[in-house]
Amino acid sequence: MVESKSRKRKKTSSEKEPSANNMKQERLKNSKSEEKKSLLMRAAGLLFAVGAGMCVAMSSVFVKKLSNDLSSLEIAVWRGIGNTILVFSYLVVTQDSGIFSGFNRNTFSLVLTRSVMFSIAIVLAFTVSQNLPLGDASALMSTSTIITGFLGIFILDEKWKLRDMLLSILCWCGVVLISRPSFLLNLLEDTPVVADDSRHRLTYIGFAIACATLTSMSHILVRKVGHRLDVAKITLFAEAVGFICSFLTLIWQEGEIRIPPENSWKYLLPICVA
C-alpha cells in the first residue's frame, strides 16, 4: 500500500511538471506573438504616417495650383463633398451595424468639437498654402506634431523626455527663422524689410500656427474618444461638418457657389481623394 501511494505521488508530481512547462511555453509563445503584433502595428503606423504626409504634400501642391481659379473656402467645400461621399460609401459597404451606432452624449460632443476644429484647420491650411511658399507653409504647419506632444502631457498624461523637449526647442527655432521677422532681418541684411510685407507675412504665419494647434487638438480628441468609435465614422462626421461650415461661410461671404472651371478638376479631384 505504501509503495502504491508513493507511485501515485510520483505520477502526480510528474504530471504537474510537464503542465507547468507547458504553461511557461504558452506564455513565451504569447509574449512573442504580442511582440510581433506590436512590431507590425508600429510598421503599419509608420507606413500610414508616410502615406498621410505624401497625401498632405500632394494636396498642398494642388491647392497652390488652384490659387488663380478657386479660393480656399471653395476648395474646402468641394473637398468636403468628395470626402463625405467616399467615406460614406466605404461605411455602407463595410459596416454591418448602423453608421451612427456607438454615439452617445459624450462621444457626440467630442466628435462634434473635433469636427469643427478640423474644418477650421482645413480652411486655414488651404489659405496658408495659397499665400506662402510651400516649403515655409509645410514647415510651419508640421509643428502640429510638437504641439500634439506638448498637449498630450497635460491632457493624456503622456511622458515627455528631455530629448523631446530639446527637439521641440530646435523645431521652434526653425519656425522663428522661417517667419523672418523684420527686427531680425534688419540686423542681418543691408536692405531694410518693408513693414507692410512683414505684417502680411506674419498674418499668414499666425494662420499656420493656428492651423497646427487646431490639428493637434483634433488628434488629442480622437485619442479621447478611443476605441469607442470607428475611425471611419469620426472621419465621416468631420468631413460632413467641415462641408456644412465651409458651405455656410462661403454663402455668407460671396452669396453663391461657383462651378470650378474644367481645367481645375484635374487638381481638385486628387484633393478630394487625398
Image (cartoon, rainbow, N blue to C red):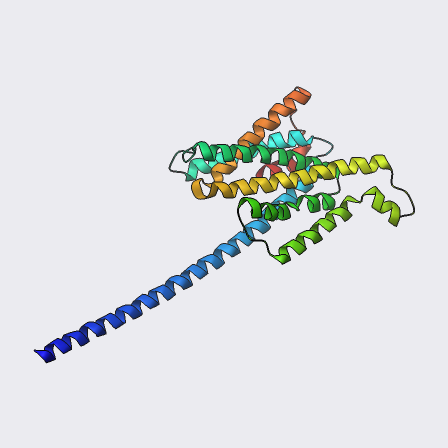
Q: Is residue 85 visible?
A: no
User: x and y percent of residue 7 in the render?
Assistant: 14, 77
Q: Is residue 92 left or right of residue 174?
A: left
Image quarter in which the N terminus is found? bottom left
Q: Residue at x 12, y 76 (%)?
A: 5
Which is more toward the observer, 125 or 224?
Answer: 224
Which is more toward the observer, 267 or 24?
Answer: 24
Asked if residue 256 is positioned above or below residue 98 in the image, the reply reads above
Asked if residue 68 is positioned above or below residue 142 in the image, the reply reads above
Q: Residue at x 60, y 42 (%)?
A: 216
Q: Is residue 96 left or right of residue 166?
A: left
Q: Residue at x 67, y 43 (%)?
A: 141
User: x and y percent of residue 65 in the render?
Assistant: 71, 38
Q: Is residue 24 left or right of residue 196?
A: left
Q: Is residue 114 visible?
A: yes
User: x and y percent of residue 140 in the render?
Assistant: 70, 44
Outermost residue, bottom side: 3
Outermost residue, left side: 1
User: x and y percent of residue 260 in the render?
Assistant: 66, 28
Asked if residue 41 is positioned above or below residue 69 in the image, the reply reads below
